[in-house]
Image (cartoon, grey):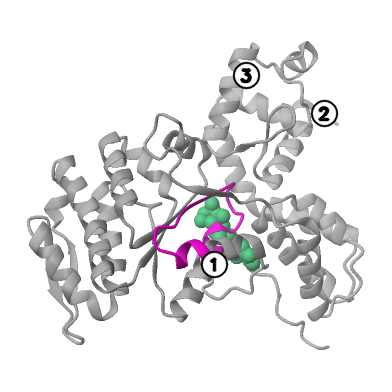
Amino acid sequence: MQPLPPNPFRYGAIDIHPEVINRVVDRSRLRDVLSEPGGRLLIHGRRRMGKTTLCKAVVEELKAEGVAVLMVDFSTATQLADLSNALLQKITAASGKGWQDYVSDLMRALSLQLETEADPLTGAIKVRLKPIARTAPIDEQRETFIGILDRANELAKQQGRHFALVVDEFQELARFEDEATLWNLRAAIQHHTHMSYVFTGSRVHLINLLMASDRAFYKMFSAINFEPVPLAEMRAWLAGKFEASGVVQLDGLGALLNLAEGCTVDRLRLAAMSYPLAAASGELTQPMVDRAYHAVIEEDKAFFQSDWQQFTQHQQNILRAMAEGETKLGSARVRQRFSLPASGSVSNTLKALLERGVLYGTESAPGYAYDNPYFKEWVHQRNQLDLGLS
Ligand SMILES: Nc1ncnc2c1ncn2[C@@H]1O[C@H](COP(=O)(O)OP(=O)(O)OP(=O)(O)O)[C@@H](O)[C@H]1O
Ligand SMILES: [Mg+2]
């Protein structure tokens, strides 16, 4: 028997050169902003849509064309000093020939907070914050953070070029709850005519906090709402991959797209799980997709179980009702069936679930939907067991 071709569907790792599903419009907008000094763009949207992947792909493309572009990830920072370190590392690496000027300029301005180390092989100087800077008073940390960006802008100006910066998961800035930093950052960014900034984020409630009319980033950015890859485009891309790997009958593809819903990763995951079932016969059928769907849920069962235990009883009951497709969560029938609290409490609970990323906001009633279709199905299965629903 011939061995099966390798699974053509991969997800999870951030590939620098992914065979991306081409988000033509978003991609060209991102390229334009990063290529133009003074550009400012916010990319926001649900988790697992492919924001980081698209940014990485465009950053690599521009780097290859000689643009000084860099990407930093704020998602794991615990304090402002961590963000400064992340910036320092990337800006020094991206300044190319100019790194010496940048470093000496920084050291003149911020020597109290910084230390340097020479790479024994290349002689290049690495700059980082002194460990003590992590415990420095917030105004010093702020001065360092903004100073790093100011000096990058100065360097770009001297060299007659520009630096493009992508900040992934920028909304973590809001966690530091230091309004002064945000306002200083706003002012700095507005003066950085030799920089361009792209911020991405997925935690909608934090982004809203930063962007509200009385908040620091109000009207600072043009925005892209990162929607699902359009269904027809996704279908064509998946079909092409299946066919190239020997699966030519695709009767189950509609069911796959339907069950996986909109998130890129959820779609790729179901495709990856379905492929080995289909590869042997060259045919993807609906029963195969159903089997793969349940296999994905089986794979994540332990995570779902432990998440479930973290929810309050109200949260669990609301999730149960939503897993049964209920939209009128305030109605007497639904409240009784799922032991829901009074409607004010229902809306607070929905908001809390949104903030945790379990739900996302939608236009249609009840205004929220499950972020993860596999989790929704798992809750539905639990309902059958726990509540005897059919
Ligand atoms: N355009 C694409 N083409 C192919 N695969 C993609 C594409 N976009 C995303 N993926 C796959 O989906 C995975 C998740 O994407 P990514 O991490 O970029 O999403 P994200 O929107 O940044 O999510 P999060 O909000 O969780 O950070 C990637 O690891 C990649 O495997
Ligand atoms: Mg991301």
SS class, disc 2:
loop
Q: Nearer the viewer, mark 3 or mark 2?
A: 3
Q: CA distance from mark 3 to mark 2?
A: 22 Å
Above or below: residue 94 compared with residue 351: below
Visible residue check, residue 11: no
Q: Amino acid at mark 3?
A: Val
Sequence-earlier tag: 3 or 2? 3
Residue at 83% x, 80% y is: 246
Figure quadrant of the C terminus? top right
Residue designated by label 1: 13
Q: Secondary structure at mark 3?
A: helix
Q: Type of residue at label 1?
A: Ala
Q: Residue at x 72, y 30 (%)?
A: 322
Answer few, some or many: residues within 10 Å of disc 3's Cα (few below 14, many 20 plus, some between 14 and 19).
some
Give the residues in magenta: 31-54
User: Which residue corresponds to mark 3?
Assistant: 346
The residue to which callout 2 is attached is 389
The x and y percentages for residue 196 are 40, 60
Determine which of the numbered discs, if any, sits on residue 255 in the image: none
